[in-house]
Image: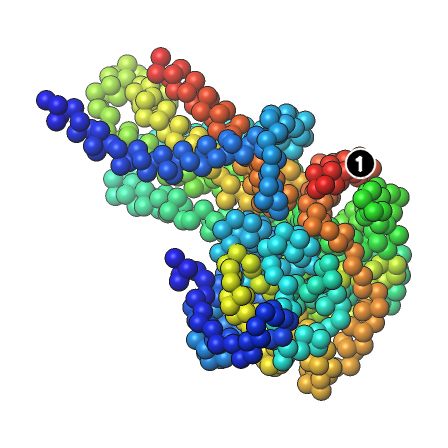
Amino acid sequence: MTNGKTLVSSIAFACLLAGSVSSIAIAAECSGTIKVLAQPRDGLTLLEEQKPEFEKLSGGASFEIDYLNENDRRAKSKADASTIGKYNVYYIDEANVALFASSGWVAPLMDYYPADYDYADFDPGRQKVATYDGKVWFAPLTGGGDLMVYRKDLLEAAGITPPKTLDEYIAAVKALNQPDQGIYGTALRGQRGSGANVWRWMPFFKGFGGNWFDGKTPVFDSEAAVKATETYLELFKYSAPGSQTGGWDEVVGAFTSGQVAMIIESTPLVGMAIDPKSSQVAGKVGYMPPPTPLTGGGYGHGLAIGTKANADETSKACAGLFIAWATSKENENRRLEANQFSELNRTSVMTSPKFAELYGPDLGQALAETGKVTAVNFWQSPQWPDLGDRWGIILEELIAGTRTDIKDGLDELNGFAKDLVARSQ
Amino acid sequence: MKQKNTLPVVFLSPAIAILAVLALVPTVYAVIISFQNRELSRPDGSFIGLANYISLFSDRRFINAIGVSLTWEAVTVGMTLIIAIGLGILLFECASPRMRSAVCFLFLIPVILPRVSAAFVWKFAFHPLYGIITYPYKAITGQPLDLLSNPLTALGTVALVDVWQWGLFFAVIVLKLLETLPPQPFEAARLDHAKTWEIYAYVAIPMLKAPLISLAFVKMIESLRAFDLIYVMTRGGPGIATETLDMYAFSQGFIESGRISYASSMAVLMMVATSLAFTFLWKRVKS
């Protein structure tokens, strides 16, 4: 039964120290297939070309990756981890790490992560979002904060300097919006979801001084939330068509196809926007930290060890070895060679001469600058996906116009949050 | 004699046993957990009686989902039958046998397409910036047409895809049914100077009443399972404008809250409501 879906391992421990299940790396000989549930990433596609290397390293194990887009991956991984537990490795992210960790669906990574692979080399911000309750749960595949990305040619033609404050940004978006020319001022995410519209709304909320909870009391129903929502809706008037119910894909697609003047998005956008293979505006793109007072949305996605499919220590060690190898310096350097900017997470790679050669000093500078305003905008709790997704629905209703009273929406969310806290106790 | 009586039991038992395992076990399980407060993130749960059911009736999204589901059923079943009967008659009247064969083949293609693939193809076709369907509007007016983001048009747009898949397929069935009808009643009607539309309205369609009702029931059941189409095209949005009951139940169970007991209570209510509705309609039709 387990042959098909889980790895069947015969183990030779390099250091078998009786009675000590330590965080020291366990060198394992693995066999069978490590099943991974992930969302599409260029880095993982590249990784699949290196299967023979992992087979050799692991002593015979292979791996198989099932891909689902972000929302579907979140739903499927939650359903799988809480029921049959078919996957040895889950792709998890900042928004659900608390849920997966507190539910016992994933194992503490460092107990099974070989020390040779140097976890400390990962970007400190990404390490921070991978940590919950004092333990590390995933190894990053992607992450970062936000950047304001803009079309240099359009701003120059309109005589607009890149905005540094939100007021300047809103004014520039309005001035650059020319639908009759096929150019829209900006593109925002309207699609429901804690990782979709709520993710892009939160920098406004936190930037205006909003907070989610004070202890267990919800405090988000505030002037900051109302102002953030009003601003978000105001900007939506100048957002590209299709973005009202669109997420990352629609927003990035609108920008890289040359239909959007300015956008504030997660840092991987830059890699796509400056790559001629994926962008029609490569060479015309500038980037800066988000305008003040917006905070950058700190995030990180990565691989974690599933507990159900890896019932014994041996299986967990093999899954840990796979994760360490998949996120290793060697593989990250391959991603750098392949110009996969958004797949880079290690300090040693991002400060390497090759990185500077490929992306120039400006991008490194912008990343360093935006790191200063990057923050954890969401509520760090296992209940966050519930709360965030509920706000996502209400926000989508406000964007679509089927609801107009912002305060009423926040009051509804407040009631939901109180019920959520009560149910969790 | 005794052997004759036991033979049906012998043949039926394996099928009933498989059905019992596949259908009954999950159904009973869903009913049981609908009386609990289980969530995906908590393995434990306790019985809370009818609390989930009572909560449903003060849940605005549930009330909205009932309305959307009923609208979806009425629009898709009604439009599918109208399109099917209209196209079936048109082909029967105007097309040569060779032409009919070619058109029937073309009409079967949409229903053969996997639903998710069809949904993706149409989603791109309706895209306000790149869509082939919306392009003429944009070219003429200079304004993009975003049908899937508009709460007033989103459900109708998704329904159009459903009708495209099933209306054309049913048109082929209606055509084949018309071909099986005896010619004498048609000839008699023509001798009485009946117009073409009167022949179909008062002769052909009444003669096809029984199979058309069966087609309506098939489509009603099929329309209840439109989750994949709606999920791919709108995910229930904009807002909750296209959120049907199954979408909302799935959302509560797996996407948002992981409240599987709450989601199960919705599933149980849907099962009871559809069973009652179909039994009532079936009896009305038979009588």
Q: How is the image coloured?
A: rainbow
Can the viewer see residue B210 in this picture? yes
In the current view of this chain or complex, which residue is farthest to the front?
A18
Q: Nearer the viewer, residue A141 or B149?
A: A141
Mark count: 1
Report which residue position mark 1 lands on.
A411
Q: Residue at x 40, y 49 (%)?
A: B113
Q: Residue B52, position in %: x, y? A: 62, 30
Q: Is residue B81 above or below residue B260?
A: above
The answer to whether A133 appears left or right of A159 in the picture is left
**Quadrant housing the N terminus of chain B:** top left
Figure quadrant of residue B49: top right
Q: Nearer the viewer, residue A118 or B233?
A: A118
Q: Chain of mark 1?
A: A
Q: Residue A349, position in %: x, y? A: 69, 80
**Quadrant housing the C terminus of chain B:** top left
The answer to whether A134 appears left or right of B231 in the picture is right
Could you tell me the amino acid type at mark 1? Asp
Can the viewer see residue A261 in this picture? no
Q: Residues within 10 Å of mark 1 (few under 14, many from 20)?
A: some
In the current view of this chain or complex, which residue is farthest to the left?
B1
Figure quadrant of residue B284: top left
Figure quadrant of residue A144: bottom right
Q: Residue at x 68, y 85 (%)?
A: A354
Q: Residue at x 60, y 59 (%)?
A: A106
